[in-house]
Amino acid sequence: MPQSDFEKLRVYPLAEMLADFIWEVVIKWDRLAQETVGRQLINSADSIGANIAEGSGRGSFADNRSFARIARGSLLEVKHWLRRAYNRKLLSEAEVARLSEVIDELTPKLSAYIKSIGKQQGGKVQPSPHRNKENNPDDN
């Protein structure tokens, strides 16, 4: 299967790595922890990559940027749920270290990606490659 545009982004594999590791961690928890903190943590982690993917396919820079911002919000939600999990003694020190490493790399890259959407070198905005404003009444 050929790679989609979002799969070529540097932030996307980091989002996948974070979501997959969170799954590996949560799957070992007891049922109460899985059904409360775990479910929220998995959903918010999966949402990061899902919103990056959806935004890249929406057809306009404004939509892409909006979905990337939602992805950043989901990343902050992951941080919240990880704090809850840590305070409830659900995470080992090794898991915290690995999660922190991925989050510390993903956070600035996701912010840089958001800033880069629709820009080219020199800071000029590029026209959307997917839509022609004259032919698309939804852009008005």
Image (cartoon, rainbow, N blue to C red):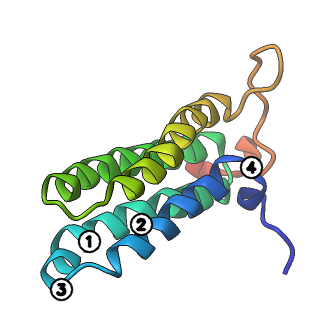
Indicate the quadrant where residue 61 lies. Answer: top right
Whether residue 140 is visible: no
Picture coordinates of residue 85 (x, y %)? 21, 59
Residue at image position (27%, 74%) is 39
Instruction: Tell me: residue 125, above or below residue 117.
Output: above
Q: Is residue 80 left or right of residue 140?
A: left
Determine which residue is flagged by label 1.
38
Q: Quick one: SS at disc 4? A: loop
Q: Earlier in the sequence, mark 2 or mark 1?
A: 2
Q: Nearer the viewer, mark 4 or mark 2?
A: 2
The span from disc 1 to disc 4 (Cα, nearest Å) is 39 Å
Relative to 82, residue 119 above or below: above
- Rounded to the nearest angstrom, the CA distance separating label 4 from label 2 is 37 Å
The kind of residue tagged 1 is Gly
Mark 2 residue type = Ile
The residue to which callout 3 is attached is: 31
